[in-house]
Image (cartoon, helix red, strand yellow):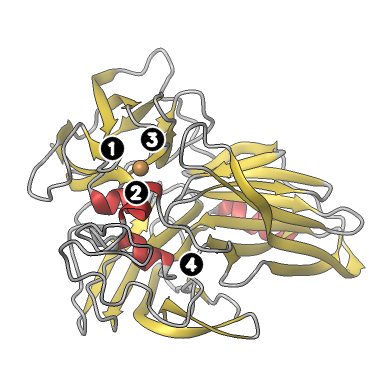
Amino acid sequence: MPVTDVRGTDGRVAVTLTAAETQVPYDGGTRWAMTYNGTTPGPTLRVHPGDTLSITLVNDLAEPTSLHTHGLHVSPEQDDPFVMVEPGRSRTFTYDIPKDQQPGTYWYHPHVHQMTAQQVAAGLSGAIIVEGADDTTLADVSTDRVLVVNDPPITTANPDEGQSSGGSMMGHDGSMMGDSGTDMMTAMMGRTGPRLLTNGQDGVTLTDPAGKLERVHVVNATASTSLRLAYDGAQMLRLASPGGRLAAPQQASAVELAPGERTELVLVPGADGGTLTAQRLANEGRGGPTGEPEVVARVEPGAGADTSVLPASFHSDDRDLFAPDVKVARTRAITLDGHMDPTIDGKPFDADTVNFTAKEGTVEEWVIKNNTPMVHPIHLHTWPFQTEGQAGWQDVVSVPAYGEKVIRVPFDDFTGTTVIHCHILDHEDTGMMAVIKVVP
Ligand SMILES: [Cu+2]
């Protein structure tokens, strides 16, 4: 089933997304999924900086759901992780996409504390592509694709049915269940499905005239799995970090994406095309590869030939937050603790407690220290940041087991209250989330 595009006119993009349990086509039959408008992933929303994006979320699920526009630099009032839509209800969310929003690949998904992992794993996700001037040039020389990768349960019915009523009980495997209805092993390791799917299928086939450049926007929409992408065609070029375009395309032999992260790649086909694969990385210890590489996309040469070339440079936000002249208003030490019950600074998530207060217009340095044997990919809403030693902008930072990462966050443009959390969504659901308030 192809992923549909939603575009707007005159600076307005409007869409209704109906979340529901659906049977979707899979492997010659069907499988159970949670879908937006009957598909997983949901439609790709294509917007421009300065646009108004209006999403009416209709909840036809049997449980609350919500909406988060991951990576967009929009106000916490508009992208509010505390607003839920109850079953049978609907709500319209309006997002004013700023004029300085970096063109790139973003995504939307539910953000319901204690249920985010199961809803995202079940298929509730879709891409948001912010298009700028370079996208017009790129569209002339490449074929644009959106590849949403996830690893849902492959099943005929809701695997969490009857397991989310609270209290502790025994899981399918005999292990104890926590309050969110998830067995403790899953809560600790993060849930995975049996196969990586791309746009809901076991890999997609991309056919174009021989030599045509394939530009792929890849979203890691898994609930808990970091991925290593590799390509065996002639060449793979990385055009963007998760938070926006790089100044120039970079040749890459592999690209790692934490859960929630995105990339934009150009696949240069060889004479026989090429195959883009993803290998899962462990959430424990050194985060090494586990299992075999799985097919994301096969590039197959079709009729005709194409010799287009990529632009040598792009518009990018080239601010360097680690430059010597950047004034750091505050340095904060943040610790990731707990193994069975992961926490931030030792405190489990409480929506009514502000954990961090920052001042609008300042740059903060966060030293994030991980005291656990697992990798934690930490995501901050609203404000993209830079990570020491990494190119470009990010909105997720993977902090290695017993290691630390340093990020710098510019709290530009908005005040308000939002969250930081682990994007191993089972960790978010069990408490590895904190409230941040930005004040004038
Ligand atoms: Cu985590």
Q: Position of residue 163 (x, y in %)?
A: 26, 71
> Residue type at mark 3?
Phe
User: Which quarter shows the C terminus?
Assistant: top left
Q: CA distance from mark 1 to mark 4?
A: 36 Å
Q: How many numbered badges does the structure rendering display? A: 4
Q: Secondary structure at mark 4?
A: loop
Crowding near the residue tagged with mark 2, few <14, some 14–19, many ≥20 C-alpha atoms within 10 Å: many
Q: Residue 32: horizontal and vertical position, in percent?
A: 46, 80
Q: Residue 73 — which label? A: 2
Q: Secondary structure at mark 2?
A: loop
> Crowdedness of circle 3 by 10 Å Cα count: few (<14), some, many (20+)?
many
| Among the 4 quarters of the image, the one containing residue 65 | bottom left
**Disc 3 secondary structure class:** loop
Q: Which mark is residue 152?
A: 4
Position of 20 with respect to 274 (left or right) is: left
Q: Amino acid at mark 2?
A: His
Q: Residue at x 37, y 28 (%)?
A: 407
Q: Give the residue displayed 35% in from the left and 47% down from the top.
A: 188
Which residue is labeled 3 in the image? 385
Could you say which is closer to the camera, residue 360 or residue 150?
Answer: 150
The residue pinned by badge 1 equals 412
State which mark lies toward you, 4 or 2.
Answer: 4
Which is closer to the viewer, label 2 or label 3? 3
Tell me the kind of residue under disc 4: Pro
Nearer-N-terminus badge (4/3): 4
Single out the mark in the foreground, 1 or 4. 4
Going from N to C along the chain, the mark reached first, 1 or 3, is: 3
Assess mark 2: CB under 8 A from ligand 1?
no
Alpha-carbon span between mark 1 and mark 3: 11 Å
Visible in this render: residue 369? yes
In the image, 76: left or right of 40? Answer: left
